[in-house]
Amino acid sequence: MSSTVAAQFSKLLQLAVQKDASDVHIKAGSPPYFRIDGELNPHEKDVIRPEQVDEIVDILLNDAQKRYFQKRGEIDLAFSEKGVGRFRVNVFRQRGAISLVMRRIKSKILSFEQLHLPDATVRFAEMPRGLILITGTTGSGKSTTLAAIVDYINNRRKCHVVTIEDPIEYVHYDRMAVINQREVTIDTEDFSSALKSIMRQDPDVILIGEMRDLETFQAAISAAETGHLVFSTLHTTNAIQTIDRIIDLFPS
């Protein structure tokens, strides 16, 4: 890979953080775009060449992730740039070329109070068992809320927390709890594979990054029924749509 492209890419991410951009869009044939205050604007006039995008992807993906991307045509992952920050990345193909979007992950895990979450959130975190779904649209704070819940548990309970994420966004360090975070495509093949073996890992609390299919949802319900506290997310806009989405997962 070109050291010039690597340096330019690092500088681009630094500028995104300085400008407090939530997302960075990179596409061959277009300039890089920053999403700031909800609006997408070009960062500069110079367009990115296809070979530059290929080199950026080479920086982002390890060998296993490259094989996954070649097979699937898209991949989610987390990327850390030293001295800059951590990003959630989606690499995908469009019109035969590669594009990617990088969402900035703010490293500090906020508390319930800082997020102005209701008192019910504390009760959910203190439940001994059950299935808790955090729902909302993209960018509504689902991952941030889950991170706050895990952090609350980590500071108060002597237990084992296992997370399955795609990708890992917030990194947790052991305090009162022991926390193992597994990333899809790096630590496990997929959500369902991880869930099949999770009961042999003696978990008390299980976090599933997203309910994507029937198999994952059934495994989550089974874990909750056998005495575990399970947290996950769904991309829905309200409580009614959440119920409808769950029903739609199950065959009629």
Image: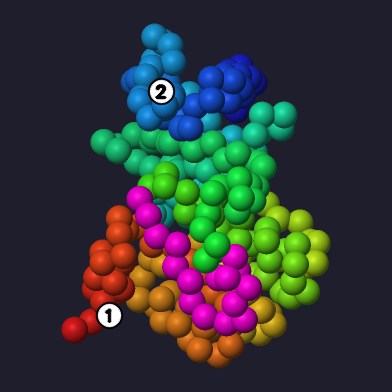
User: SS of the residue at dot 2?
Assistant: strand
Which of the pair 193/117 is nearer the observer?
117
The amino acid sitting under disc 1 is: Phe
Residue 188 pos. (x, y %): 58, 66
Using the image, tell me which numbered label, if any, was put on residue 137.
Answer: none
Which of the pair 63/161 is nearer the observer?
161
Residue occupying the point 53% across, 25% down:
20
Number of marks in the image?
2
Left or right of 149 in this view: 94:
left
The amino acid sitting under disc 2 is: Tyr
Residue occupying the point 72% across, 74% down:
160
Which circle's residue, 2 or 1, is located before the other in the chain?
A: 2
Query: Which residue is under mark 2?
Result: 33
Query: Which segment is the magenta one?
Result: 122-137
Q: Are marks 2 and 1 in contact (CB under 8 Å)?
A: no
Which of the pair 36/250 is nearer the observer?
36
Residue located farthest toward the left when viewing the structure as drawn: 252
Residue located farthest toward the bottom when viewing the structure as drawn: 226
Q: Quadrant of residue 79?
A: top right
Residue occupying the point 57% across, 82% down:
129
Left or right of 73 in this view: 122:
right
124 in the magenta segment? yes
Above or below 186: residue 24: above
Which of the pair 77/61 is nearer the observer?
77
Residue located farthest toward the front when viewing the structure as drawn: 119
Residue occupying the point 52% across, 66% down:
120
Q: Neighbour class for label 1 at 10 Å: few (<14), some, many (≥20)?
A: few
Left or right of 83 in this view: 70:
left
Query: Which residue is under mark 1?
Result: 250
